[in-house]
Image: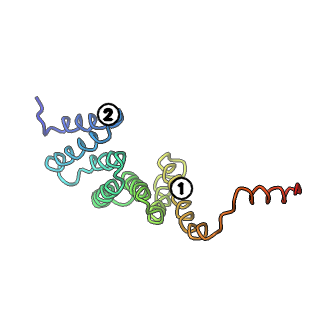
Amino acid sequence: MQGPDHPDTLTARHYLAHWRGRAGDAADAAAACAELLEDRLRVQGPDHPDTRHYLAHWRGQVGDAADAAAACAELLEDRLRVQGPDHPDTLTARHYLAHWRGQVGDAADAAACAEQLEDQLRVLGPDHPGTLAPRRGLAHWQEQARAREQEPYRAARPRRSTTTRRYRAGEISGLV
């Protein structure tokens, strides 16, 4: 018998939490990942960041994007310290941090974080699948930031009634 602290047991618990979440129970997956994180940190030490990623993911899936962003920030700190800025796992952590910060509503910060795409391209190359998600994320968050900048303009513009819009459409097309 391997015992509760054996690395294989911890890995099995990780997969159990993962599949609970995939089956639709994100809250239970997040709770299981939180318990697993405590045990991994106790057994494997603070330099074993694998579980933090899943904890952040399931917390976000439960609807707690702020907590997911905070967990990703901790994960990124660990990855930078242990693996360095150019490690593919570090680049992935930066991407997820940008994603969850954007979900919190900080599109400008998310766009700035998502600019790590340049590092992804430099480290992994333009054809690597790991650059696809950051490319999409960068475009999405830049668009969100632009939309937020334009909100005051949109709010200040007078709304036209449906009748006015129909009249203008007819006027433009020469029907009126």
Q: Secondary structure at mark 1?
A: helix
Residue at 14 percent of width and 46 percent of height:
43
118 relative to 157 in the view: left or right: left
- Number of on-image labels: 2
Q: What residue did someone put label 2 on?
A: 19
Mark sitting earlier along the chain (2/1): 2
Q: Report the amino acid beneath label 1.
A: His
2 relative to 125 in the view: left or right: left
Toward the viewer: 113 or 166?
166
Q: Residue 1 location, x and y as percent?
A: 10, 28
Image disc number at residue 29: none
Q: Is residue 25 visible?
A: yes
Residue at 18 percent of width and 50 percent of height:
41
Identify whether 170 is placed above or below 28: below
115 relative to 56 in the view: left or right: right
Q: Residue 18 location, x and y as percent?
A: 31, 37
Q: Report the amino acid beneath label 2.
A: Trp
Label 2, label 1: how far apart the Cα atoms are: 29 Å
The quadrant the C terminus occupies is: bottom right
Toward the viewer: 99 or 116?
99
Q: Residue 160 location, x and y as percent?
A: 69, 62
Q: What residue did someone put label 1 on?
A: 140
Residue at 32 percent of width and 50 percent of height:
56
